[in-house]
Image: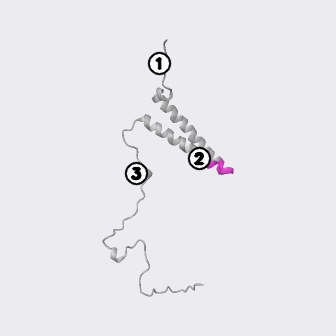
Amino acid sequence: MKKFSKHPSQTPNGADQLDPAKPCETAKGAVTQSPRRTPTTRQVFTVAPGVDTLTLLNQACENLASLNVLIASFAGKLEGSNRQLLLSIQQLAAVTELLVNQARENLDPRSGAPDAQPPTLH
């Protein structure tokens, strides 16, 4: 068992305790400490400018469909109020996917319909 004293012990070689915020003597000048700044999600992920609306809606729809599947899979592993909460989130994702699909259909009505074949005349 280790004994603790009221007075801090001296290290045998007189070295200071390591302080992660303080660079070692040999690294002075080589490493400059700067305050860490956490970038926002918007700064990390961006959408390329100039992408057309229909493409953006297509990607949003695919992301929502994936989110819906992931949430449903995870909800299957939960029980009780946590499951109900997750299924509510899944329902919001599903409704949002429907809204995005309708907006996409409004922009390009032909995109959702199968290509019409010209009638065959005999």
* Residue of label 3: 43
* Residue of label 1: 118
What residue is at 36 percent from the left and 38 percent from the top?
50
What residue is at 53 percent from the left and 41 percent from the top?
64
Q: Give the structural element (helix, strand or loop) at label 2.
A: helix
What residue is at 40 percent from the left and 35 percent from the top?
52
Amino acid under disc 1: Pro
Label 2, label 3: how far apart the Cα atoms are: 26 Å
Query: Which quadrant of the rendered structure holds the N terminus?
Result: bottom right
Label 3, label 1: how far apart the Cα atoms are: 49 Å
Q: Give the structural element (helix, strand or loop) at label 1.
A: loop
* Residue of label 2: 71
Which range of residues does the magenta coloring cover?
Answer: 71-83
What residue is at 42 percent from the left and 55 percent from the top?
39
Amino acid under disc 2: Ile
Give whichever of 118, 41 is nearer the camera.
Answer: 118
- Of labels 3 and 1, earlier in sequence is 3
Q: For marks 2 and 3, give the one nearer the viewer.
A: 2
Amino acid under disc 3: Gln
